[in-house]
Image (tube, rainbow, N blue to C red):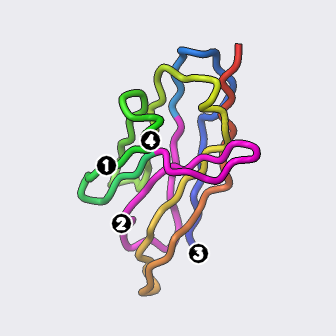
Amino acid sequence: QVRLVESGGGLVQPGESLIVSCAASGDIASVNAMGWYRQAPGKERELVAGITLGGSIDYGDSVKGRFSISRDNANNTAYLQMDALRPDDTAVYYCRAVVYTTLGYTRVYWGQGTQVTVSS
């Protein structure tokens, strides 16, 4: 059993910043990759940012230069620093982790989602 717990969403004004975090816990041998996806009403879920265990990073085109992902491998936690937020960043943000479990298999896990709303 693996759980992903997200925190830090909320309501901010355009141009402001927000940090969301995702902590993985449970039957974890290693967390191979962690990332954030988002889904706005009426739209498909899209990649925001991802980071591998080795530190390779990928960003969605719409957030490049504004968002930054990092991770604390010792605590299986990922962080998403979001700067210069815009109304079109409004969405539910989901944490995703590729976990090699102590039970000997690799599986993708998703968090429950955290709402980020950018509005004046």
Q: Which residue is mark 2?
A: 32
Which residue sits at x=26%, y=52%?
55
The nearer-to-camera label among 3 and 2 is 2
Estimate the spatial distance between the alpha carbons at disc 3 and disc 1, rounded to whole Å.
Answer: 27 Å
The nearer-to-camera label among 1 and 2 is 1
Amino acid identity at mark 1? Ile
Which residue sits at x=58%, y=75%?
1
Q: Residues within 10 Å of mark 4 (few under 14, many from 20)?
A: many
- As drawn, the label of residue 57 is 1
User: Residue 66 lies in magenta, yes or no?
Assistant: no
SS majority, magenta: strand
Mark earlier in primary sequence (4, 1): 1
Which residue sits at x=54%, y=16%?
16
Mark earlier in primary sequence (3, 1): 3
Estimate the spatial distance between the alpha carbons at disc 1 and disc 2, rounded to whole Å.
Answer: 13 Å
SS label for mark 2: strand
Dots 1 and 2: beta carbons under 8 Å? no
Q: Which residue is mark 4?
A: 79
Amino acid identity at mark 4? Tyr
SS label for mark 3: loop
Residue 81 coordinates in the image, percent (x, y): 44, 32
Estimate the spatial distance between the alpha carbons at disc 3 and disc 2, rounded to whole Å.
Answer: 16 Å
Mark earlier in primary sequence (3, 2): 3
| Residue with the most extreme right position | 42
Describe residue 46's horizontal placement relative to residue 63 as left or right. right
Q: Is residue 96 above or below residue 30?
A: above
Estimate the spatial distance between the alpha carbons at disc 4 and disc 2, rounded to whole Å.
Answer: 15 Å
Q: Which residues are magenta?
A: 20-48
Dots 3 and 1: beta carbons under 8 Å? no
Amino acid identity at mark 3? Gln
Residue 99 coordinates in the image, percent (x, y): 44, 70
